[in-house]
Image (cartoon, rainbow, N blue to C red):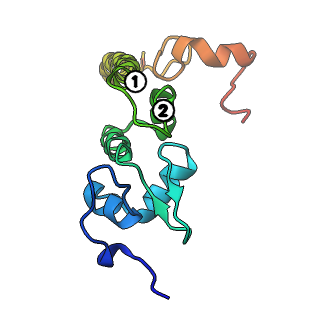
Amino acid sequence: MTASNDSDRTPHAPDEPLTIGEMSRRTGVAPSALHFYESLGLIASTRTAGNQRRYARHMLRRVSLVTVAKRLGIPLSDVQEAFADVPLTQTPSHDDWQRASRRWKRELEKRREGIERLERELTGCIGCGCLSMKACGLLNPDDELGTHGAGPQRLQD
Ligand code: FES
């Protein structure tokens, strides 16, 4: 009996699925990370008769986008949301990716606004230094601690 592995595979047709080794080489992502992404539903594979994973070629784009998201510090849960409407088991259409792109862009805009707000508050707080739980938006944004009751909420934890 001969077992098929990555090294003895011959070049294949452009629509032929990829082995996990080929996915790893083409994306630069370790097989263990590909398994993890698969467990999160970010990518999917099929199995051969010999129970080996095979990845449709459109999974390359998904893995590349996950890699970019990680570099930007975007949590995988956000990537899951962005991919929510992109078909997993069939090749996504241009429109599918456009929808995901718009969703992603809205998410990035929210993050950017949050970072800019934090930057403004931090700049003010560095100059201020009062550390007031009432007045400082950085220590107690929107008086969040006030909703937990009166008194020193942080000391009660
Ligand atoms: S330290 Fe004074 S407002 Fe934040």
Q: Quadrant of ligand 1?
A: top left
- The answer to whether 57 appears left or right of 50 in the picture is left
Q: Write down the quadrant of residue 30 in the picture.
A: bottom left
Q: Looking at the picture, tell me which residue is in the foreground, 144 or 70.
A: 70
* Mark 1 neighbour class, 10 Å CA radius: few under 14, some 14 to 19, many 20 or more: some
What residue did someone put label 1 on?
96
**Residue 97, relative to residue 8: is it above or below?**
above
Residue 138 drawn at (x, y percent): 45, 21
Does any portion of residue 125 appear in the rendered image?
no
Q: Nearer the viewer, residue 152 or 45?
A: 45
Residue 29 horizontal/vertical position (percent): 34, 58
Check whether the beta carbons of the residues at disc 2 and disc 1 lie within 8 A of each other. Answer: yes
Give coordinates of residue 96: x percent, y percent: 40, 24
Q: Amino acid at mark 1?
A: Asp
* Quarter of the view holding residue 10: bottom left
* Element on which disc 1 rests: helix
Residue drawn at the location 31% of the way across and 21% of the way down: 119
Q: Is residue 25 left or right of residue 3?
A: left
Which type of secondary structure does the marked residue at label 2 adopt? loop
Give coordinates of residue 22: x percent, y percent: 32, 63
Q: Quadrant of the C terminus?
A: top right
Q: Residue at x 36, y 27 (%)?
A: 93
The residue located at (50%, 23%) in the rendering is 139
Query: Please, what is the three-letter code of the amino acid marked with disc 2?
Result: Pro
**Residue of label 2:** 87
Ligand 1 lies under 8 Å from the Cβ of mark 1 = no
- How far, Cα to Cα, is label 2 from label 1? 8 Å
The answer to which quarter of the image holds residue 34 is: bottom left
